[in-house]
Amino acid sequence: MENYLSLFETYNVPAAFWVNIQLSFWAAIIALVIGTVLALFRISPIASLQWFGAAYVNIFRNTPLTIILAFGFLGLFSVMQISLAADLNVSLFRIAIVGLALYHAAFVCEAIRSGVNTVPLGQAEAARAIGLSFLPAARLIILPQAFRGAIAPLGNVLIALIKNSTVAAAGSVAAESSSLMKTMIEFRSDLVIPIFLTFALGFVVLVIPIGLLTTWASRKLAVAR
Amino acid sequence: MTSEPQPTTPASSGSPLVSLRNVNKHFGDLHVLRNINLDVARGEVVVVIGPSGSGKSTLCRAINRLETIDDGEITIDGKVLPAEGKALAKLRADVGMVFQSFNLFAHKSILENVTLGPIKVRGMKGGEAKDLAMSLLKRVGVDNQAQKLPAQLSGGQQQRVAIARALAMKPKVMLFDEPTSALDPEMINEVLDAMVSLAKEGMTMIVVTHEMGFARRAADRVIFMADGQIMEQATPEEFFDNPKSDRAKDFLGKILSH
């Protein structure tokens, strides 16, 4: 037990989790914005936008996240010299956020689209009938109802995103938790199983409230019909 | 294609407010609108009846382009119905629509349902829109429900709100697509009463309905559709007492025998 506790003196585990929380937070916000725009593209009356939305979703949803994040580090940063900050680690951190956001935007788009499917067609027809064009109808009538119908699937995307933030290791974000776990295992092979359990528990604790919260919110905010 | 006679006789003089010229529409192999010609004069109340599948709802929905048409031309107040975009939205704002399933905005209060169009489409100020909405809600008798959500109202109340929502746009013409078909019997009259008083005030109305009593009370002209064609049109007295086509006789025989 003392051995185990000494781990926390040597290694700053909460700081590593904090990196994952920050990665997830920013990636979630960017993914929500991009995903909403993509969902608008996919339900828009303009064929080229529909096509773009579908192409984006199919490309990013079907590419392994590890490849996207490794490309961010090796392709964008190392080869193409694209840097998002003067400091090396900050730049890698931001590139990882962009990679996570681009990947999860595809899932956000599909979650919102499933929400749009919960809105009866008559709502859009009524919006058009009073003279709203596509964007105002989407903003005022369709999306507010679609988001309420999409809370649970959006919650699932967020849960996946938090856990997937460990893949940022592939983008050389060394401060995040799975990288720290690797280091700890390397130096304290006597405690492999407790170390695994610690990190597993850490993520469970992070993720469970999100599941509870989204279930509660999707009930609370459901549109009465 | 049969060539039934399709008289186009508006009830009053002047240029027609709504005009359909040689309108055709197919759903796949089904020819739902066959060469429809129809003029509706300002202030006229036209009731469209016919068996289900006759194309009467499609006709109603085509007039504000919720259904596209394959060919032909629809004009509203002299303007050809645009294909899409802002011009279409602008024209739709002048055409009130009441749906069979009410379609009130489910996440907005009754009051917001009525003020949304005037504020967002007409650019009206909030206070002014609220006054307008409350007076319209009062007129259809649901002003005491203004703060509730649509799901908290009965079907008849919801449909009256839908009428108020359409009226708030100050439309040139009102389209009713089977407005009482989804209602419980005891609520049909409250909606029909609102429609009759609207007709008496001179609103131009195109009403698809199965309510023959409404047609007799409020219609200037009855149009009978079958198989995507206008089979017959006449004043309500003429049509109900002395239908000319066999299809109309057959239809009236079936619905009036009970």
Image: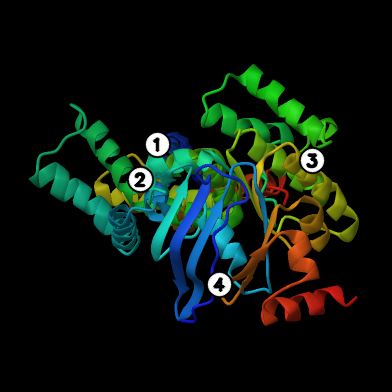
- CA separation, marks 1 and 2? 8 Å
Q: Please give the residue where the numbered disc 2 appears in the rendered image.
A: A101
The answer to whether residue A20 is visible is: no
Q: Please give the residue where the numbered disc 3 appears in the rendered image.
A: B197
B186 is higher (above) or lower (below) than A217:
below
Q: Chain of mark 3?
A: B
Q: Could you tell me residue B80's position as x and y percent?
A: 40, 48
Q: Could you tell me residue B164's position as x and y percent?
A: 71, 37
- CA separation, marks 2 and 4? 55 Å
Q: Please give the residue where the numbered disc 1 appears in the rendered image.
A: A26
* Residue sitting at x 15%, y 49%: A74
Which mark is drawn over residue B229? 4
Q: Chain of mark 4?
A: B
SS class of the residue under badge 3? helix
Which mark is drawn over residue B63? none
A121 is higher (above) or lower (below) than B246:
above
**How many residues crowd around disc 4 within 10 Å: few (fewer than 14), some, or many (20 or more)?**
many
* Residue sitting at x 58%, y 19%: B125
Q: Nearer the viewer, residue A78 or B13?
A: B13
